[in-house]
Amino acid sequence: MSVLSWGECDIFHATSTAGAPSGEWEELPTPKEDTTQLVPTAGTAKEAKEEGGALVDYLAAKVTHELEFTLFVKKDEEPPFEDDDGVIAGEHAFRVEPQDKDAQAIQIDRSTLRVEESYSSADGILMKYVAKVLKPKTGKSVKKMKPSEDFPDEG
């Protein structure tokens, strides 16, 4: 058992409707090693300065996130999403579960999705998926929970 939510992960996808996951969660193929990451971007801050430059007040905007993961294109396997030159229609929900189901997992209830296709002789064709996290119906944009407790077994 690990202490951290690291290592090989399972990524699940569902449709997002009205800002919340709807329908069945489907497991995506195992991503390329070390490509799954939640990338934060600091919000734009507002500063109130008085003459001379002293800071009177400060207002921080919320952090935004993108979930990124890369999948190999394999023989006789269809990609999990259809795209139109990188644009994937609809809204999407994701959850990323660590190998240790007692460690923290993340869930994103609402996002838009795009894909960036690349090729190298070392890896073949790769599909890098980028989910821009949007404000959900309720709660935080990125929720943390334990899969063993909060994600029911849907098998």
Image (spheres, rainbow, N blue to C red):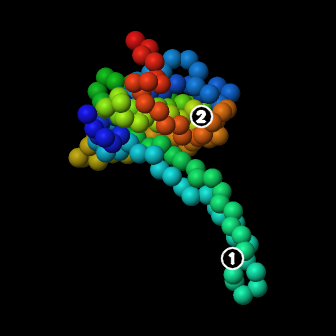
- Residue 35 screen position, x and y as percent: 35, 44
Identify the residue shown where x is 39% and y is 32%.
97
Mark 2 vs mark 1: give the one in front: 1
Disc 2 element: strand
- Decide which of 59, 20 is in the foreground and name it: 59
Mark 2 and mark 1: Cα distance apart in space? 36 Å
Q: Judge whether residue 79 can be spotted in this image.
A: no
Asked whether, in this view, residue 141 is left or right of residue 124, the answer is right
Q: In the rendered image, which quarter is residue 117 located in?
A: top left
- Residue 36 screen position, x and y as percent: 38, 42
Q: Residue furthest bottom?
A: 52
Q: Judge whether residue 46 can be spotted in this image.
A: yes
Tell me, for residue 110, which label it has, or none: 2
Q: Which residue is mark 1?
A: 55
Identify the residue shown where x is 65% and y is 64%.
45
When the figure is inspected, residue 128 is found, relative to residue 82, above or below; the finding is: below
Q: Which residue type does callout 2 highlight?
A: Arg
Identify the residue shown where x is 28% and y is 38%.
2
